[in-house]
Image (spheres, grey):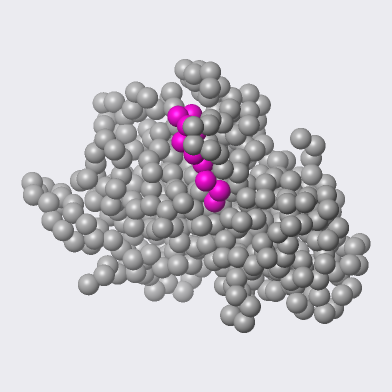
């Protein structure tokens, strides 16, 4: 597929954008915002602003592409007045790309169509700080993979030191089905879950608030095109079904998870909450940041054998702010999405390999992403050796597991030749357990 003209690194916008901004004109991620007087609207992020796609459509700014993409033309403008991206995603890749490229044209520094229309600017362009961002999609299903070799090995050493890696791990992308309706948008507080766990040194379990609340640094892809039950997706076609990426924090109650461990995978220790970033960065925008993945040994079976560059060079970091702190959050880990052993394409192909249908808007998380160094671990389980070696932080704070009032922020960006494409951030603050 030829490179999108919206990716041209020389493009400049008439909106002021700093080199460190996550959302330059080459990015243009999609999300859903809400303004009290107007209700929900689909939007595109540009710098510190959100471009209201519904108002742009109302003013005729997408009429020029409606004939070329009939499915989009038939859906305008109402497809942009929704509480999720799902209806827009169902229009297919031609519509996604046409809208992104048209928005790129409208925001170019030398295009007066929107730039010189003061009334349209007041109607269509809102500061992100003045809008409420909603969860970007409404997933029917949510799957969490276990695709980082370093993370899987580290966890295995903690729990199975003699045989840390499961025998099937290098042969297929392991995953479990999570709880789609517990996924919340960034900024939503997360209440400490209660459950059954066994305190150290005791034989009998107790029921109460988790004492080992953890974060997990993950990315996730959004399914754009679904499939019919019984059909499969060849690896070469897998990315045609992926709309884009978000950041993802799969909160975990480690003590509950450990006690309930069973062959079917996690249950109450994982399904109480997961947090997702509000802006979906398209695969098209990330095209310049493709890289080869790690060598896979032994070679996967033919249906999972990858060729070309199916991984992405995306820097990731975890920031932590203790309860009651006024200082800026502190970075406690940095890693990179390129460390994932199994690519998004392999994950999707494996999911569909038994004929399981894919649904538009579904969320597929990577699993915790850890790197090869002590400072690149994606969970407190690893960073603190299951809480036995707390992190010593400024102000005398010792961080083993999360306490009430603590805030975790995940950030991510790709950067190359002076161009930065950011994924924004996903944040959450821990609330006390329910009475």
Query: Would you place residue 310 above or below residue 398 in this image?
Result: above
User: Can residue 434 be found in the magenta stretch?
Assistant: no
- Given residues 407 and 206, the one toward you in this image is 206
Look at the image and tell me whether residue 67 can be seen.
yes
- Quadrant (top left/top right/bottom left/bottom right) for the N terminus: top right
Q: Which of 59 and 313 is in front in this view?
A: 59
- In percent of width and height, residue 27 lies at 71, 53
Q: Which residue lies furthest to the left in this view?
A: 203
364 vs 15, left or right, is left
Q: Quadrant for residue 106, please give it.
A: bottom right
Up-down relation of residue 258 to residue 323 (above or below):
above
- Determine the residue positioned at 51% across, 41% down: 358
Residue farthest toward the front in the current orientation of the protein = 74
- Asked if the stretch drawn in magenta spans residue 357, the answer is yes
Look at the image and give the residue range highlighted in magenta: 352-361
Judge whether residue 335 can be spotted in this image. Answer: no
Question: Could you say which quadrant of the image residue 171 lies in?
Answer: top left
| Above or below, comparing residue 374 to residue 130 in the picture | above
Q: In this image, 319 relative to 313: left or right?
A: left
Q: Which residue is pictured at 75% across the width and 77% down the height? A: 123
Q: How many labels does the image show?
A: 0
Can you give x and y, in whole percent of width and height, for residue 234 in the image? 58, 27
Toward the viewer: 279 or 72?
72
Percent coordinates x, y for residue 389 in the rendering: 30, 49
- Tell whether 215 sits left or right of 158: right
Report the quarter where the C terminus lies. bottom left
Q: Nearer the viewer, residue 98 or 69?
A: 69
Does the magenta stretch mainly form a helix, a strand or a loop? loop
Position in image of residue 154 (x %, y %)? 36, 36
């Amino acid at each position: 597929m030829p490179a999108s003209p919206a990716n041209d690194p020389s493009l400049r916008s008439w909106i002021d954008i700093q080199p460190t901004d996550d959302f330059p004109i080459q990015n243009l991620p999609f999300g859903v915002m809400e303004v009290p007087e107007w209700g929900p609207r689909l939007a595109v992020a540009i710098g510190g602003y959100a471009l209201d796609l519904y108002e742009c459509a109302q003013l005729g700014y997408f009429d020029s592409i409606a004939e070329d993409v009939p499915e989009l033309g038939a859906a305008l403008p109402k497809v942009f007045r929704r509480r999720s991206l799902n209806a827009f995603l169902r229009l297919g890749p031609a519509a996604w790309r046409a809208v992104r490229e048209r928005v790129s044209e409208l925001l170019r520094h030398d295009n007066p169509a929107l730039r010189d229309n003061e009334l349209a600017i007041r109607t269509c362009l809102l500061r992100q700080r003045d809008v409420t961002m909603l969860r970007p999609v409404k997933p029917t299903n949510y799957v969490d993979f276990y695709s980082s070799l370093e993370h899987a090995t580290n966890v295995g050493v903690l729990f199975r030191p003699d045989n840390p890696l499961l025998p099937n791990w290098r042969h297929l992308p392991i995953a479990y089905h999570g709880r789609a309706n517990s996924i919340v948008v960034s900024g939503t507080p997360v209440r400490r879950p209660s459950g059954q766990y066994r305190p150290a040194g005791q034989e009998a379990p107790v029921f109460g608030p988790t004492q080992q609340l953890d974060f997990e640094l993950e990315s996730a892809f959004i399914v754009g095109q679904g499939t019919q039950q019984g059909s499969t997706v060849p690896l070469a076609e897998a990315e045609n079904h992926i709309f884009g990426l978000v950041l993802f924090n799969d909160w975990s109650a480690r003590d509950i998870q450990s006690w309930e461990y069973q062959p079917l995978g996690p249950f109450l220790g994982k399904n109480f909450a997961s947090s997702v970033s509000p802006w979906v960065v398209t695969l098209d925008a990330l095209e310049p940041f493709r890289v080869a993945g790690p060598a896979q040994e032994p070679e996967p079976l033919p249906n999972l054998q990858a060729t070309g560059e199916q991984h992405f060079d995306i820097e990731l970091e975890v920031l932590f702010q203790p309860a009651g702190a006024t200082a800026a959050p502190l970075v406690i880990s940095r890693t990179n999405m390129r460390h994932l052993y199994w690519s998004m394409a392999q994950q999707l192909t494996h999911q569909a390999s038994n004929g399981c249908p894919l649904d538009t808007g579904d969320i597929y998380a990577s699993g915790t992403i850890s790197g090869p160094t002590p400072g690149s671990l994606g969970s407190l389980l690893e960073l603190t050796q299951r809480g036995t070696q707390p992190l010593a932080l400024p102000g005398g704070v010792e961080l083993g597991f999360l306490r009430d009032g603590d805030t975790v922020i995940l950030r991510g960006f790709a950067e190359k030749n002076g161009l930065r494409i950011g994924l924004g951030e996903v944040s959450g603050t821990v609330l006390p357990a329910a009475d």
